[in-house]
Amino acid sequence: MAVSVSPALAGPIEYLFKYSATELLDSAHTMLPYLPQLKYIGNWINLVKVARHPGVLWNINYIEPSDVLVKLNELIVESEKIFFVSPDSTEIKDDFYAENEELAYFHIIRAYLRAEEGNIASSMKIWNQLYSTWLFRQHPQRKSNLLAHLYKVFMCTKELDMAAHCINKLWTEISITEQVKRYEYGMWDNLTNIFLVQWVFSYYVDEIASNLTSELANFQILRHKRQEIAPLICKDTQWLVATCSRPFYDHARNLMPTLPSYDIAKMTQNELPTKSKNESQKELYKNYKNALDCKDSIGIPEFHRHAFNLFFEDREKFDNCYVWSDFWNKHGPDIESVLDIGCGLSKKTYDIFKDKNLVALDLSDVVVDHWNAQDREIIQMPAHEYLPQSPDFDLCVFSDSLDYIFNYDMVLRQCSLKCKYILISVSLIEFVVHSASGIIDFNRVVLSCNEWEQVISKHFDIIATEGKECNPCWFLMLGKSKNIH
């Protein structure tokens, strides 16, 4: 018998994002009676995955399920009876098949549903199978996501050794994955999520703080920064409760009463995305040009705004102008005009080149407002849009900003056509902790010194460097354009 379902099931998983939650629920209702006749169940898994996923982890739909989500969950439970040998088993019956990644995601949903039903013990049986049996079967991207889920579950059940193992496994995955894939697979995003949860638990539960600082002694950052970041995170308990899931967070509070409480009445329902993933991303980029300052975009937790504003406001305290000026005095050519791309709040470039014709470029509203208040001219525009229409400059400066430009190669090529010289400082470490805010910043392109040299030397002849031989954390580089003579 041919399976007849609604059009919402026709196409890959990206196609499903165009449908509303109600339309997807209708499709699930239509498909359920035909499930026993299917062999491949990946379409069903993708359908319920998209229908359950609210687009943002801290959506209240994960805390106070809507009527649509409740009905969908009931259909998922019915499908479990068809696919699996027993309620707590993760092994599928011989009559069915799906990809390992698809099955693992379905098991994650099943485990959360057990907890939502009040059965933490049954849920943990599935989580433990995911850790012991399914983790090694996963693609690195899926493995990274699964480890983030497992970490939070183990923290909420106070299985601290298992939580530490999850961090170690994720670090291992990151270390063996090429740089670009780390961003593409969302590995840094998952690690960020883990650290945020870790900071809250270690801040409020002394036993966890003691355990973490002994088990993870190399993470010096934990001891120094958790005092600053945890209160910021807990300004938004909605995010915290949803990312841990309400039943697991409630379980955690029973085990660890010092964790912060929350008030459902003060939580809000975020609008669910109705457009495709790519369309939504394009719209967000159009409306909020600076990713560090997307104050009102869907689902961005309140603490992001506070933390990054802290960083911007205090940034100038941590500038090291001496190193820059000394390097420029030794190696810099005679120039008259300077373009400062990603100027930030730093006074470094301004102090060194204040007697030159200096043009500053940045995307952040915070930065633009700061310099406008001081009557300093600044252009708010992405570098790749400004450079094609810009005048020529003697020097282009990237002061710890090039590694935040993901189309850096295109921008460097544009610079080589408009700027005779280039002066760059770049951090080489895997993650940066901003001294003012205590935020770990993963929103960067992280390359080695040699890799940056190769990228830059495609467009500029390197004249001088500093820090390459003696400092593993940063370097300065001066180059001359290969396209301007």
Image (spheres, rainbow, N blue to C red):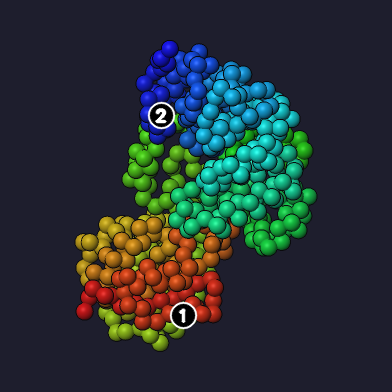
The reply to whether residue 115 is in sight is no
Whether label 1 touches label 2, CB < 8 Å:
no
Q: Disc 1 or disc 2, which is closer to the eye?
A: 2
Cα–Cα gap, marks 1 and 2: 51 Å
Q: Position of residue 313 (x, y in %)?
A: 49, 61
In this image, 392 relative to 136: left or right?
A: left
State the SS at label 1. strand
- For the residue marked with disc 2, what is the amino acid? Leu
Q: Position of residue 278 (x, y in %)?
A: 36, 40
Front residue of 159 and 393: 159
Q: Position of residue 9 (x, y in %)?
A: 41, 24
Front residue of 95 and 36: 95
Q: Position of residue 48 (x, y in %)?
A: 50, 26
State the SS at label 2. helix
- The picture quadrant where one finds residue 217 is bottom right
The reply to whether residue 135 is in sight is yes
Please give the name of the residue rendered at 60% of the width and 33% of the height, measured from the top-left corner. Answer: 108
Q: Residue furthest front?
A: 94
Q: Which mark is residue 466?
A: 1
Q: Residue furthest bottom?
A: 330
Q: Is residue 337 above or below residue 41?
A: below
Q: Which mark is residue 16?
A: 2
Q: Earlier in the sequence, mark 1 or mark 2?
A: 2
Q: Residues within 10 Å of mark 2 (few under 14, many from 20)?
A: many
